[in-house]
Image: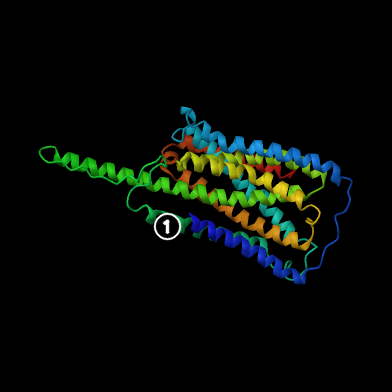
Amino acid sequence: MSCSKSILIIFFILLSNFSVQVLSVVEDCGAEEDDGCTNKKKALPLKIIAIITILISSMIGVCLPLVTQSIPALSPERSLFVIVKAFAAGIILATGFMHVLPDSFDMLSSTCLKENPWHKFPFTGFVAMLSAIITLIIDSMATSVYSKKHNSGVVKPESGGEPEELAVVEAGGGGGGHSHFHGHHHGAKLEVQGAQLLRYRVIAMVLELGIIVHSIVIGLSLGASNNTCSIKGLIAALCFHQMFEGMGLGGCILQAEYKFIKKAAMAFFFSVTTPFGIALGLALASTYKENSPRSLITVGLLNASSAGLLIYMALVDLLAADFMGPKLQGSIKLQIKSYIAVLLGAGGMSLMAKWA
């Protein structure tokens, strides 16, 4: 998985370098207008409240699927788990379409940027499309590399021990034919389960990386802002967003069946990224200007790339994988419930766009 991490990190670094190179044709934009809401002193306690509440919301969201796995009704094999995961996937999908992508459009079409090239070419759509394609490449290549790495046996839950070899039971005598068939059948079943587990692990890792980048960007924007009117709405929206986005990620981590240490590490990094972004924004508040060309270009391009990744992951790896899977295909009733859950999640997150 280090290969996929490196590719994704290089992609974001290239975006940042590209934004710096084009600054030679962009002039500095004016300072923020004072609309009565800008107050640095009053904004500081709101940001501290945001760090605490968003951290708690993120921890609750990502840990809830992990700590409730012992509850039979919430196990991955039960219908309720599928419905909750569909709801969380709707949240992630709406985040990409209704929050991150429009923000990128606004930033990269700002009047603070030069007419050429920013108003002559739809950079947001182009970068989002490119990001989705790169995510597909990473998704596919990571699965191939991971498959070859474990081609000596079936991928097992990370509970210790070596990968389990596919054994074929062969016995002599009168019951030999039955035992031989049973061994092949058992081996094939293990192979299918191993391939599915491998996919869950790739999905969990790629989704985590995308969410981390997106979370740092939104945290940075909140931390650098001194607009008390917008911060209040953002706190409520981000708490809702982080909790249910965390539930989606937590469900993927649970299905990946990692060791406890890896589960804890992934949950930790998800929980602290947005608070870290806010703290970083606080530290850079004196130099970071939301409407400066450098900030608009860098954050705009990062938002576009995050949107492409989130939309791809929500549609392909979360929704399509579940809805086209055997569990939902075998039950029309469960499909309808899951569709309703997706619409509720996407609708609720879309409604949040009114305030954030």
- Foreground residue, 344 or 285? 285
Q: Residue at x 79, y 49 (%)?
A: 225
Task: Indicate left or right for 172 with 211 as reference.
Answer: left
Name the residue that disc number 1 marks: 145
Q: Quadrant of residue 293?
A: bottom right
- The number of numbered discs placed on residues in the rendered structure image is 1
Q: Residue at x 67, y 54 (%)?
A: 101
Q: Residue at x 39, y 41 (%)?
A: 160
Residue 201 appears in the rendering:
yes
Task: Indicate left or right for 118 with 9 as reference.
Answer: right
The image position of residue 244, as x and y in percent, is 61, 39
Q: Quadrant of residue 146?
A: bottom left
Q: Residues within 10 Å of mark 1 (few under 14, many from 20)?
A: some
Mark 1: which amino acid? Answer: Val
Disc 1 element:
helix
The image position of residue 179, as x and y in percent, is 19, 39
The image position of residue 348, as x and y in percent, is 65, 39
Give the position of the C terminus as an image quadrant.
Answer: top right
- Foreground residue, 260 or 293? 260
Q: Quadrant of residue 162?
A: top left
> Is residue 9 placed above or below 95 in the rendered structure?
below
Task: Indicate left or right for 53 with 143 as reference.
Answer: right
- Foreground residue, 107 or 243? 243
- Type of colouring: rainbow
**Which residue lies most toward the left here?**
173
Q: Residue at x 88, y 53 (%)?
A: 33
The image position of residue 302, as x and y in percent, is 66, 57
Residue 130 appears in the rendering:
no
